[in-house]
Image (cartoon, rainbow, N blue to C red):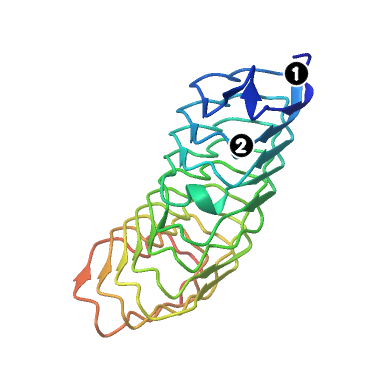
Amino acid sequence: GDGGDVQIPESINGIPVTKINGNCFAGDETATSISIPGSVKTIADGALASAHGVIKLTIAEGVTSIGDKAFEKMENLVEANIPVSAANQLGAWLFSGCKSLQKVSLPEGMPKIPMFAFDGCSSLGNIDIPDSVTILESQSFRGTALKEITIPAGVTQILNEVFSSCTQLEKVTFAGNNVSVIEYFAFNRCKSLKNLELPTSLCRIGGGAFWGSGLTGLIIPYGVTELEGNIVYQCGDLQ
């Protein structure tokens, strides 16, 4: 079409629209909003990547699979949602590089935050992680504008560089006591993070986990049996 508000039809000439192919809207600069109907089951890899004009993305219940880099580098995207129906099949780099993204709704039922999901979303100041999530995969929130975050009670692993370079992050709350692993550089360069109470469930802290953070103190739980090097390197405020 001519762009503007784009509503993908449920059918064309009586044939259901069930898939948005890879690169379908890639690089498009005319559409300002896109609505995807429930007839669509699959949003393929890179389907809307670099669709720079889109400000709002609405995905209806019914979509069951969203591929890698589906919405990568949609640089003007401000608001989006992920339906419950797609919770179990979300690709990596989902919103990576969406530097204007401010509001995103994530569904209950997600087992993980995929790797690089919000990497470089430098306007994302707030997000609610669903209680169903058990793993925060690598670099999933790296370089975001998060000021505080609650880690749900079911989370057991925070993998490498999850909150790396979140320079505005001031408060991290662990809702439960199940995190056993905080991997390398998980909180590195979190310069605004002054205090952090680690869960007693913790068994492993990877190298450089808090490298260059603003921590003024840190108590390592008694149960930690794997403690790699340089976890508080260049923490100039540490007392």
The x and y percentages for residue 229 are 25, 61
Residue 31 drawn above or below residue 173: above
Q: Kindly identify which residue carries mark 1.
A: 30
Report which residue position mark 2 lands on.
Answer: 98
Q: Residue 92 carries which label?
A: none
Q: Is mark 1 on a helix, strand or loop?
A: loop
| Circles 1, 2 touching at the beta carbon (< 8 Å) | no
**On the rendered image, what quadrant is the N terminus found in?**
top right
Q: Which of marks 1 and 2 is in front?
A: 1
Determine whether 108 is above or below 217 in the image.
above
How many neighbours does mark 2 have within 10 angstroms: few (below 14), some (14-19), or many (20 or more)?
many
Q: How crowded is mark 1: few (under 14 residues within 10 Å), some or many (20 or more)?
A: some
Element under disc 2: loop
Q: In this view, does 61 lie above or below 212?
A: above
Q: Residue furthest left?
A: 225
Q: Which residue lies at the image location 51% right of the left edge and 43% below the top edge? A: 119
Residue 97 percent location from the top left of the image: 56, 35
Total tally of numbered discs in the picture: 2
Place of residue 44 in the rendered image (x, y in percent of width and height, measured from the top left) = 47, 28
